[in-house]
Image: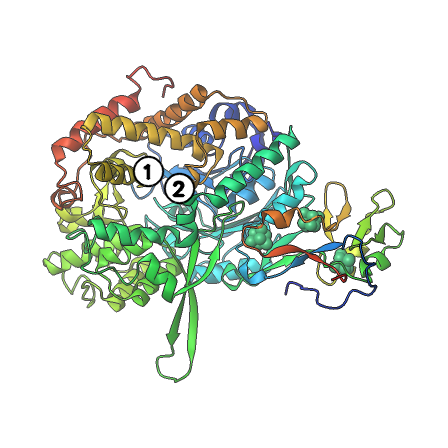
Amino acid sequence: MAVLWAGPWPHAWPRGWAVPKRLAVVDPGRCVDCLLCALACSRRFGEGGLARSAIAVRSVGGVEHGFVVIVCRACPDPPCAASCPVGAITKATVGVRVHPERCIGCRTCVLSCPFGAVHWDEDNNKPVICVHCGLCASFCPHGVIALEEVGGG
Amino acid sequence: MDKALTRVLRIDLTKKRTWVEERPNLFEKGLGGAGVAIELLYELCPKDADPLGPENPIILAVGPLNPLFPLASKAVAMFKSPHTGNLGESHCGGRVALALRLAGFGALAIQGKSDVPVYLTVHRGRVQFRDARALWGLSSSLTAGRVLREIEPGSGARTILRIGRAGERLVTYANVIAETYRHFGRLGLGAVFGSKNLKALVISGTGTIPIPDPPRYQKLYRELWERATRSDHMRKYHDLGTAQNIRPLNQIGALPVRNLSATRYNEEPAFSGERLAEGFLGRRLACSACPVACIHLAILREPHPVEPYFYKTTFVSYDHEPLYALGSMLGMESPEGVLKLIDSAEVWGLDAITTGVVLAWATEAFARGLITEQDTVGVKPSWGDTQAYLEMIRRIADRKGELYWTLGQGVRAASEKYGGQEFALHFGGNEMPGYHTGPGALLTYLSGSRHSHLDSAGYALDQDCLRAGQNPPPEELACRLFAEEARRQVLSSAVICFFGRNLYDWETIQTALGVLGIEKSKEELMALGAAILRQKYAFKVREGFSLEKLTVPMRAVETPTPLGVISEDYLRKALAEMEQLLRGDDGLAGDA
Ligand code: SF4
Ligand code: SF4
Ligand code: SF4
């Protein structure tokens, strides 16, 4: 199922700082499979389509049974970063960052993420992982995904 | 322009051979979608082709706006129709357009006939022929979909197009089902699949579409997204779906009831959009790239025939047209009954509209003694009888027995054989849609290139006329419908869903194309629309069609509409005018 991260953020956020946000799947039950989120994510790069989208939607055994939204949940201790043999994925304030110049395209990270949230850019042979910018959420017409404060509040 | 859009994937099922053609000129001329598909049909379909012969091509096409803008969600199919024997055109949402375009193609054309049942897959731009012998003959189209979903890759960005038994057995109005609940519904594409031994077509695609001017694109996208999600017009499809039409049509007396012997129920039908939403609505879905989500799924909960506390639940997608055809047209009362009939058409792979009109004709023919219990093999069709209709739908898909075989060819064939032509509700061989609103609707059915209510939406014009108390002269009506149908050719070449027609006025289409580097003036776009329409008409004439020789079903001109009884004389005048317009003798730009 899609993931709603509920645990406490490991380190308290200093008072007065802008609280970092992560993209959360708040209610996959309302998803209608329009793919506007995935198409929005590709627009980050000024392109159309899905090649470099960090979010995907799949049916749970047929559209009548609903959907899962597959996107990075911003692990506090990210296994994808730990799995990379060349250090091309590092932990960030929220989620992780990919350093494409270091990446050798081995796909180890793809296997490491239990949610399947490490997507793959076939053209460039590099991973695509959500950076929690929230662009997709602003185009979801049905309130399925949203930016949510992490830990701080 | 995006180079990938101009690639046409060619597939020959006889020789099991595939190749790709680069056709920039084709897309420059026709834009995409309908404009490109009609060109390809003209080119690939030989004159007088047998619609069920290997020579009939199956063409699918998408356009420059798919899936780059809100509601740019449709794909267009063209073929020669085994149902009417003429132009076959059908549109489908779901994920078809997204998958085909992101697989790196603007169109595909399938020709020939496989010696064994196969299904085709297109993954990462490569075609494979796969053995479909095990899938052939399955009793439910849903099972075929489930199996393919499991064994094929590309989940999340793929379309699974397949036929049911009706398609395999060449019922001339068999449909092609996409992703479950979406269809290339009308004019028998399913039978064309069946005739080629083609069970299914799976396409997945996650490619990129280059955008020449990203900031302008982002800005326009946001603007259109906002207009689409906020407009009242969209709200209508959003809230109740197309089913919201049942209540108002019943109120004004424009809902065809019991084979159009009446036009309203005394009280609001129990299967109106409102009543279904309250009692049955279980889930909503959207086509890829569409913020509206007009697809409404009802939950049908049925008890086990003997065991207590044992239920099965079925999801049934409902829309205005199936509710009319398998509801009011059959005098149905119970919403559960209507949902069961819709589900059954889905399972066997039949076009719901034609199926309903066929059953309505059979019910009346049975009552009048034109067909007997011997013909029906013991089934006694009567208005509202769910069980009888379920049985008949199954037999039509099975094609066993003379009557059922003939019913599988539509009401034109059935009434030619058994009589009852005066109440056989077809227009140009295609069964009537669910609006008996007035002259606009009838003229659309008669003259529209697909004989479909969506061609020029005369029903909407009728409702405007009713509100405004107008009665346009036949020539004016023809001109207005021609202009609307021409405009719709541009939408279906882009390809924008017709529910987005108010969002995409000329200026918006122009801007959207401009952002993608396709510069066209409004006049050029208008001329393009007229040219596409005329080219379709030219194809129809080539295949023996004549507006003049069209018959008008007597029932349609006898049963009053909210705008009164429509005389055949009026319709003939309008048709004559329409013919002038379609031939292009009016000085308007764009030639056939
Ligand atoms: S990609 Fe997967 S493993 Fe890595 S941080 Fe996101 S959810 Fe965790
Ligand atoms: S939050 Fe940003 S990066 Fe993550 S899926 Fe949405 S648009 Fe893509
Ligand atoms: S935009 Fe929202 S409703 Fe549409 S597919 Fe994404 S999560 Fe689902």
Three-letter amino acid code at the position of disc 2: Ser
Residue B514 at what x, y percent from top left? 56, 26
Q: State the residue in front, A151 or B305.
A: A151
Quadrant placement of the C terminus of chain A:
bottom right
Task: Tell me: A102 left or right of B490.
Answer: right
Give yes or no for contact between labels 2 and 1 (Cβ–Cβ under 8 Å): yes
Is label 2 in a helix, a strand or a loop? strand
Please tell me the numbered disc located at residue B118. Answer: none
Residue B217 placement (x, y as % from top left)? 61, 33
Name the colouring of the figure.
rainbow
Subunit that carries the residue with mark 1 = B
Image height of B303 relative to B337, above or below: below
The span from disc 2 to disc 1 (Cα, nearest Å) is 8 Å
Q: Horizontal placement of A30 versus B395: left or right? A: right
Where in the figure is residue B403, as x and y percent of width and height?
A: 21, 57
For disc 2, the marked residue is: B90
Q: Residue at x 21, y 67 (%)?
A: B379
Task: Give whichever of discs 2 and 1 has the lower sequence position.
Answer: 2
Say if disc 1 is inside 8 Å of ligand 3: no
Extreme bottom residue here? B308
Name which residue type carries label 1. Answer: Arg
Residue corresponding to mark 1: B450
Tell me which chain the residue with mark 2 is part of: B
Relative placement, left or right, of A100 versus B204 is: right
Residue B592, compared with residue B290, is above or below; it is above
As drawn, B23 above or below B389: above
**In the rendering, at what x and y percent does residue B384 appear?**
22, 64
